Image: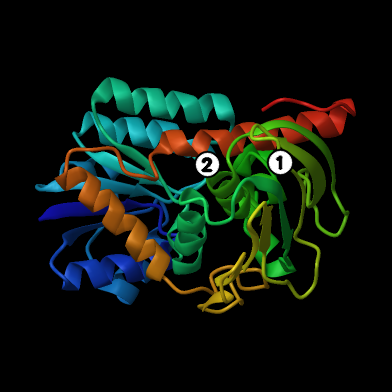
């Protein structure tokens, strides 16, 4: 039974802890404990979940049986923390994005390869039941050739969200709405529709909050398969709405709104999967079911047991970071940019 440790006990820990509790009860893993620099966060974590806490990373990484480390800290810390975990003989699962920028994200992927360890990234939207059905329909050709693929992420984040020191600042987060919030939907769009050949983008800061990153962005996309589409993303759309992905193919179309899929295939009755459309688009960014987190961690555990790379390998998280960086370059240059 693999031992799992957690580094970072802030806002992101809740769905992971719920998933780990389920998997521990099922006998798939053993939670070794968690670490955070803050004594208050350690105490709150121990009180909420009943697992041990460590006041030094080195003590956590030296724990007997530890094999997988969840890194749930701000993006710029992922690379050094992952390297420490690799050196301790552990695989890692890092919160999105893989790292603060594309170069550091690629360095983390390379570090895992040099160490002979696995590095996976938290893109749990890929593991939602509706998204899995959508992906299967595309992979088996049910929608035909993809002609148009677009997304809309019109979310809201309130003052309490931005009260966390450094939230929304490039020095801490690496980016704004694109890298911090919309990245889940952007990753899923690429996961479904394939890579992007070029992007023409716009981005600005609304002035509603004291941040130095974008909170309003839009772009036009040209995919390598010939499809075209558009994306708009913001965190100023009060009170927040379900994110959407819409794909039109030569044999059908589909609309994914959070966890509801409406699939319309030529010659078939509509196929609807509805697991809700609330998501985390409103003031509470954690208002979603932890089932996809459980499925994602299960995939990592299966990959370790089967000695293979997980489907959410960190390398699969590089294309969305390259797209975001090209989008922001385009917003500055006024020209189309290639990821």
Q: Residue furthest top?
A: 114
Residue beneath disc 1: 227
Question: Which residue sits at x=78%, y=28%?
Answer: 329
Q: Is residue 54 visible from the viewing direction of this image? A: no
Q: Could you say which disc has been placed on residue 239 in the image?
A: none
Image vertical order of residue 201 relative to residue 260, above or below:
above
Question: Which residue sits at x=53%, y=46%?
Answer: 191
**Which x, y percent locates residue 127?**
42, 60
The foreground one among 114 and 48 is 114
Quadrant of the rendered image containing residue 153: bottom right
Residue beneath disc 2: 75
Q: Quadrant of the C terminus?
A: top right
Image vertical order of residue 203 relative to residue 30, above or below:
above
Query: Which tag, 2 or 1, sits closer to the chain's start?
Result: 2
Answer yes or no: do the residues labelled 2 and 1 have beta carbons within 8 Å? no
Quadrant of the rendered image containing residue 304: top left
Q: Quadrant of the N terminus?
A: bottom left
Image vertical order of residue 255 relative to residue 227, above or below:
below
């Amino acid at each position: 039974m693999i031992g799992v440790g957690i580094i970072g006990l802030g806002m992101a820990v809740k769905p992971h802890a719920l998933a780990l509790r389920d998997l521990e009860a099922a006998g798939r893993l053993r939670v070794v404990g968690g670490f955070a620099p803050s004594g208050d966060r350690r105490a709150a974590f121990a009180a909420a979940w009943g697992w041990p806490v460590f006041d030094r990373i080195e003590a956590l990484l030296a724990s007997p049986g530890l094999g997988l480390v969840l890194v749930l800290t701000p993006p710029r810390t992922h690379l050094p923390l992952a390297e420490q975990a690799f050196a301790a003989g552990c695989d890692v699962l890092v919160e999105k994005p893989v790292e603060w920028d594309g170069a550091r994200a690629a360095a983390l992927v390379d570090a895992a390869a040099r160490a002979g360890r696995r590095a996976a990234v938290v893109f749990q939207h890929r593991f939602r039941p509706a998204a899995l059905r959508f992906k299967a329909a595309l992979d088996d050709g049910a929608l035909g050739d993809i002609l148009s693929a677009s997304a809309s992420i019109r979310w809201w984040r309130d003052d309490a969200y931005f009260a966390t020191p450094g939230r929304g600042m490039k020095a801490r987060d690496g980016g704004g709405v694109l890298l911090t919030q919309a990245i889940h939907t952007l990753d899923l769009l690429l996961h479904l529709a394939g890579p992007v050949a070029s992007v023409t983008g716009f981005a600005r800061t609304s002035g509603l909050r004291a941040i130095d990153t974008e909170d309003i962005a839009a772009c036009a996309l040209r995919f390598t398969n010939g499809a075209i589409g558009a994306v708009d993303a913001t965190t100023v759309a009060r009170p927040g709405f379900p994110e959407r992905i819409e794909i039109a193919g030569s044999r059908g179309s589909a609309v994914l709104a959070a966890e509801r899929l409406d699939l319309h295939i030529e010659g078939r009755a509509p196929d609807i999967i509805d697991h809700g459309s609330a998501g985390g688009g409103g003031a509470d960014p954690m208002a979603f079911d932890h089932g996809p987190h459980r499925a994602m961690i299960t995939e990592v555990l299966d990959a370790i047991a089967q000695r293979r790379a997980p489907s959410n390998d960190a390398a699969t998280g590089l294309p969305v970071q390259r797209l975001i960086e090209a989008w922001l370059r385009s917003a500055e240059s006024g020209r189309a940019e290639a990821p």
